[in-house]
Amino acid sequence: MRIGFDAKRIFRNTSGLGNYSRSTVELLAKYFPDNHYFLYSGFDRNRTGFQIPEKVELVTPSSWIGDICPSLWRSGCMASDIRKHRLDIYHGLSNELPFDIREGGAKSVVTMHDLIFIRYPNLYKKIDRYLYEKKYRRSCRYADHIIAISRQTKNDIIDFWNIPEELISVVYQGCNPQFYQVVDQETKKRVKEKYALPDQYILSVGTLEERKNLMLTLQAMVAGHIDVPLVACGRYTEYVKALQAYAYANGLEDRVKFLYNVDFSDLPAVYQMASVAVYVSLFEGFGIPILEALNSGVPMITSKGGVFGETGGDACLYVGQYDREDMAEALKTALNDTQRRNEMIERGYKYALNFRDDVVARNLYAVYKKLL
């Protein structure tokens, strides 16, 4: 089988959609090495350091349009290259397909991650909402098949855009295999010193934006008189100012530590040294930090409803997204109830096996096989 991928995120994005794109290519190349894979990229720099696997070929623009405007080539002028490489499948990994995908002769698949911009329009600029609506809806209507990364996303595609259910398959993603391994004590010591981590801490991993709802954890620390500090790892946004102001006003300034540039390779140690992890986001397409925590042997507190039960199963404590008392009680349980902690850790390991690499790869490949 000859399979092509939209590689925009592979070489440009260090998290989120980039991780999903890189993981997809790596898993398929590893578990199904007899195929020939193509990465279509209009970007001539590798910002992420991605190591292209064997049997995977990098394709850059071959037309004058691609030379002048790579983004236009990627979004609307791919058909000739798809025909040239005789693809069986073209897979848009991040919500998009080229406008001319039906002229390329290959079966098309698009992965849809979420429709948060429809559910929470206030979190997006008007022009971004317009472009997402136009591009993503069109991709869903033109695709031969859609992969949704959760039942939540599948239901949203059906409800908002009236896409027939039989055209959508749920294929869960996993987390990076580095979270499967126990980190040695020497590495933990190095990482602890590198980031000046406290001996005990509550951990949050994810972009520091309003949707991630980190304010609830600060409010619960105040309401529950919880002395264990919070370590928040993620990309800086203006929301941090509100968090800092609240922390200062409530005497938490010495118990909240923001880390904006944690090396990805250090994250397993950061997780495994944490006392508890929190991820009480308002809405997600999946929630990778939940899986990272479960694989790391850390009790996880996350949100009730939405996709979170899909990702966390019976291993997490679930709280109301605006209920500081609920969150405070969950933190106390996860921090102090040894039996419950051990149960959560054991259940987390077992549940996370559903998202291991071999399972994800087989499910992805099954979608391709169904189309041919």
Image (spheres, rainbow, N blue to C red):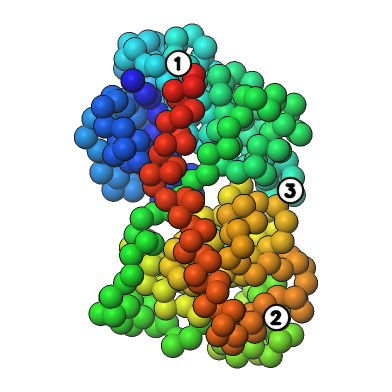
Instruction: In the rendered view, tell whether residue 166 sits above or below residue 116.
Output: above
Nearer the N terminus, badge 2 or badge 1? 2
Q: Name the image quarter holding the N terminus.
A: top left
Give amino acid for label 2. Ala
Quadrant hosting residue 143:
top right
Amino acid found under the numbered disc labelled 1: Leu
- Residue at x 49% of width, y 51% of height: 354
Reading the image, the residue beneath label 2 is 328
| Image depth: mark 3 or mark 1 in front | 1
Q: Identify the mark nearer the N-term, 3 or 1.
A: 3
Read off the residue under disc 1: 372
Which numbered disc, 2 or 1, marks the residue closer to the eye?
1
**SS for tag 3?**
loop
Q: Are marks 2 and 1 in contact (CB under 8 Å)?
A: no
Secondary structure state at the residue bearing disc 2: helix
Which of the labelled discs sits on residue 120, or is there none?
3
Of callouts 2 and 3, the N-terminal one = 3
For the point 38% across and 62% down, the residue is 179
Which is nearer the eye, 299 or 81?
A: 299
Residue sitting at the far left: 54
